[in-house]
Image: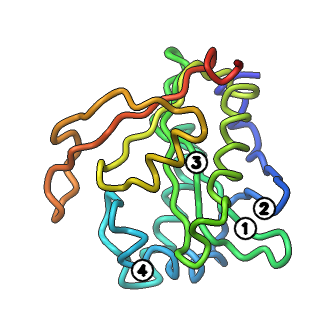
């Protein structure tokens, strides 16, 4: 398979506790609950949500990104009740360079339970095995030590600090660590 084939139909993934699935308009309230929490968005490149319509717009933006083969974002749902408790996915997908970036967030009540490691492990397998990626990377604020530790646990290496790498609007220009996982390291 290849990067382009992944966009033929939205791939649903399952892990021991989770279903990674396509987001739907009916997930707007759950997504708003996640992204309206200042602690969740503390290291996020967007402002904390103040209305459910922002969550609806975000779900539609992710859907448009998938339709236009620019990104793929899964809702992370618990198997027992299908409640979306976070999201994760690929953006910045480069089919020639065989690389993509990952992003993610998780509702605060579910932090430090191994949920994001479980979800990211599933999309990393899909990235290397189905999308044929050579490199998966992530940019993380240096202060976000939990995210840096999570990525390092998954095999990502910190490649250094990108000074004032992104404009985060009201939050100013953000210094970000670049962490990456290469196929050859993942295969070992």
What's the distance in space between the residues labelled 3 and 2, CA to CA?
15 Å
The image shows residue 85 at horizontal and vertical percentages of: 63, 72
Residue visible at 65% across and 27% down? 4
User: Upstream in the sequence, badge 4 or badge 1?
Assistant: 4
Q: Secondary structure at mark 2?
A: strand
Check contact, mark 2 vs mark 1: CB within 8 A: yes
Q: CA distance from mark 3 to mark 4?
A: 20 Å
Distance CA(mark 4)–CA(mark 1): 18 Å
Q: Residue at x 63, y 14 (%)?
A: 184
Q: Which residue is mark 3?
A: 89
The residue carrying mark 2 is 18
Question: What kind of element bears circle 4?
Answer: loop
Cβ–Cβ under 8 Å for marks 3 and 1:
no
Q: Is residue 45 above or below residue 66?
A: below
Q: What residue sits right under mark 1 in the picture?
A: 77
Mark 2 → mark 1, Cα distance in angstroms: 6 Å
Relative height, residue 127 to residue 51 (above, below) = above
Indicate which disc, 4 or 2, sits on the residue closer to the N terminus: 2
Q: Calculate the distance from the C-alpha at mark 4 to the C-alpha at mark 2.
A: 23 Å
Identify the residue position indicated by label 4 in the image: 36
Callout 4: few (<14), some (14-19), or many (20+) C-alpha neighbours within 10 Å?
Answer: many
Q: Is residue 81 left or right of residue 87?
A: right
Q: Nearer the viewer, mark 3 or mark 2?
A: 2
- Residue 164, located in which quarter of the rendered image? top left
**Mark 3 or 1 closer to N-term?**
1
């Amino acid at each position: 398979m290849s990067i382009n084939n992944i966009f033929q139909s939205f791939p649903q993934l399952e892990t021991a506790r989770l279903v990674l699935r396509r987001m739907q308009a009916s997930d707007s309230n759950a997504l708003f609950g996640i992204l309206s929490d200042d602690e969740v968005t503390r290291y996020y490149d967007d402002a904390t949500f103040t209305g459910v319509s922002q969550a609806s717009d975000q779900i539609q933006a992710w859907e448009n990104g998938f339709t236009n083969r620019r990104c793929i974002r899964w809702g992370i749902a618990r198997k027992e009740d299908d409640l979306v408790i976070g999201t994760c996915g690929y953006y910045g997908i480069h089919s020639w360079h065989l690389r993509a970036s990952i992003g993610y967030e998780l509702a605060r009540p579910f932090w430090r339970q191994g949920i994001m490691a479980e979800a990211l492990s599933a999309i990393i397998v899909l990235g290397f095995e189905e999308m044929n990626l050579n490199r998966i990377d992530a940019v993380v604020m240096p202060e976000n030590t939990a995210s840096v530790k999570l990525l390092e646990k998954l095999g990502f290496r910190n490649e250094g600090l990108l000074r004032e790498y992104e404009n985060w609007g009201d939050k100013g220009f953000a210094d970000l660590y670049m962490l990456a996982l290469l196929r050859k390291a993942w295969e070992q």
